[in-house]
Image (spheres, rainbow, N blue to C red):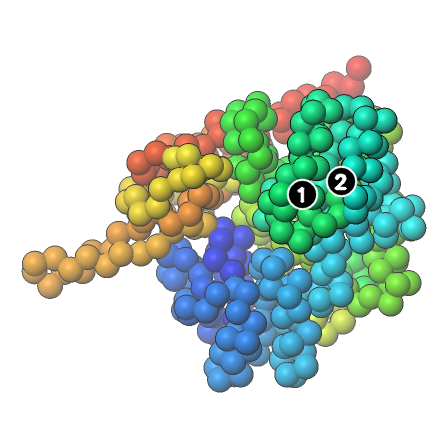
């Protein structure tokens, strides 16, 4: 089969890497891809949200199956356009993608179908939003309704901070129309976990659990990022909790979507807070998580392409279950100096060749590009340069989480580029919850 993967991050590198292992894949293209993806697929210079360009390419190149990484293309309706053209594609259609594109839609669906989530209220008037903030007090959470590149959520410690967030979103329109409506919600406490499932609206297959680390510095300090690291499985999600999350959150949501007449096919990603009252939904995403995918896919033994094809054809019942590597995985993100604020690009990356030789470690590129240097002699040298905030995801496997942590960080230490920073504590929370699980008080 001829496959097209859309996107350019670490998630897409992991998807291409996994699809390339399928016996069904003959040729893989990636639009636009990155320098790591270019090692295993043909990268084409079409932006991930250029739907007309992608459609044109898929037709001309006789693409058999397209896999969409980022949410923007999904919410623009890429799946609807491909389907209209008779092309097979993995991901939810535009209507189904509203689950991520509108937090108001998602919260209202959860309320209607009794999916546990934080108490909330929706506002289209900033004064009323601020009045409500005074009433409920701090801490509270202010969320822009629409897509805001992962920046539309403010967990406000004070009333003043919450009021400022409302002003910024609703009056200053820092996220444009995404801030026309805001949600003010109760602040939940607990550990977070990411639960991803694949569904065709009839069947649901869960992927391994994972825990992301959104804050930039160790011990969950500093501003939020796209994700600085992740491990899988998340031991805090015990078998019982996993079952409860599936029953009370995932199945109820998918049933709710079906009752609303929405045909959901693709990945459903539930961001969960494990509170004292039980698991509650923080948000839904309609795509694979980044960096969750980088830690989850190296543990998946089954053929992902086969599963995705069955999903698109609404024949997921053909897939019995997924086979997993019992080992743990840890993914540490190497970020550019300054990230998540302003950062420089174009710094040479060292150590990639050395890490490529290490067993049980794989590197997924996120923000990288290739420079081919012509020496005076005819020799061509390839240089990998930084080209984004999150530059690389280094993933290590291990029989225990401790071993996975050790393998990953041993590899991370071999990588360098000017300004590089990374969290040093990815995986530690898993050790804490292991202790708790083994020694209940
Ligand atoms: P979201 O994009 O909705 O997942 O929000 C981004 C991050 O904000 C989450 O991963 C949580 O860390 C935090 N967050 C969102 N909603 C809440 C909430 N109700 N209570 C506490 N933290 C939250
Ligand atoms: N890991 C967070 C996200 O993919 O949105």
Work out whether mark 1 precedes mark 2 in sequence or the reverse, and give the earlier one. 2
In the picture of the structure, the residue carrying the numbered disc 2 is: 126
Foreground of the two, 171 or 401: 171
Residue drawn at 65 percent across, 76 percent down: 81
Q: CA distance from mark 1 to mark 2?
A: 7 Å
| Mark 1: C-beta under 8 Å from nearest atom of ligand 1 | no
Quadrant the N terminus occupies: bottom right
Foreground of the two, 432 or 263: 263
Residue drawn at 32 percent across, 38 percent down: 417
Task: Give above or below for 34 relative to 340.
Answer: below
Please identify the residue farthest to the top as the structure is shown.
Answer: 441
Foreground of the two, 303 or 343: 343
Any part of residue 238 in sight: no
In the picture of the structure, the residue carrying the numbered disc 1 is: 171
Asked if the residue under mark 2 is in contact with the one under mark 1, i.e. CB atoms within 8 Å, the reply is yes
Residue drawn at 67 percent across, 43 percent down: 171
């Amino acid at each position: 089969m001829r496959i097209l993967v859309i996107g350019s991050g670490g998630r897409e590198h992991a998807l291409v890497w996994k699809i390339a292992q399928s016996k069904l894949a003959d040729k893989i293209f990636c639009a636009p891809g990155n320098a790591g993806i270019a090692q295993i697929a043909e990268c084409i210079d079409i932006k991930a949200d250029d739907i007309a360009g992608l459609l044109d390419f898929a037709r001309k190149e006789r693409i058999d199956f397209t896999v969409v990484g980022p949410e923007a293309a999904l919410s623009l309706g890429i799946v609807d356009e491909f389907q209209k053209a008779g092309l097979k594609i993995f991901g939810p259609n535009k209507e189904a993608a509203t689950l991520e594109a509108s937090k108001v839609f998602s919260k209202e669906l959860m309320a209607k179908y009794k999916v546990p989530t934080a108490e909330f209220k929706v506002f289209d008037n900033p004064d009323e939003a601020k009045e409500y903030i005074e009433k409920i007090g701090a801490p509270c959470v202010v969320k822009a309704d629409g897509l805001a590149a992962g920046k539309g959520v403010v967990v406000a410690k004070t009333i003043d901070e919450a009021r400022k967030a409302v002003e910024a979103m609703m009056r200053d329109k820092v996220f444009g129309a995404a801030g026309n409506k805001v949600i003010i919600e109760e602040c939940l406490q607990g550990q977070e976990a990411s639960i991803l499932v694949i569904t065709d609206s009839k069947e649901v297959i869960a992927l391994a659990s994972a825990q992301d680390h959104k804050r930039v510095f160790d011990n969950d300090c500093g501003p939020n990022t796209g994700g600085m690291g992740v491990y899988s499985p998340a031991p805090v999600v015990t078998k019982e909790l996993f079952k409860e999350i599936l029953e009370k959150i995932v199945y109820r949501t998918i049933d709710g979507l079906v009752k609303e007449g929405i045909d959901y096919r693709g990945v459903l990603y539930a961001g969960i807070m494990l509170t004292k009252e039980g698991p509650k939904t923080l948000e839904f995403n309609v795509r694979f998580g980044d960096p969750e995918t980088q830690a989850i896919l190296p543990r998946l033994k089954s053929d992902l392409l086969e599963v995705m094809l069955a999903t698109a054809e609404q024949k997921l019942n053909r897939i019995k279950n997924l086979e997993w590597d019992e080992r743990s995985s840890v993914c540490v993100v190497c970020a550019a100096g300054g990230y998540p604020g302003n950062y420089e690009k174009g710094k040479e990356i060292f150590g990639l060749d050395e890490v490529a030789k290490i067993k049980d470690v794989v590197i997924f590129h996120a923000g990288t590009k290739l420079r081919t240097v012509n020496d005076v002699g005819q020799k061509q040298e390839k240089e990998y340069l930084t080209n984004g905030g999150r530059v690389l995801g280094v993933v290590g496997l291990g029989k225990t989480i401790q071993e996975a942590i050790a393998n990953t960080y041993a590899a991370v230490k071999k990588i360098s580029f000017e300004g590089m920073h990374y969290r040093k504590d990815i995986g530690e929370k898993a050790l804490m919850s292991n202790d708790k699980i083994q020694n209940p008080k």
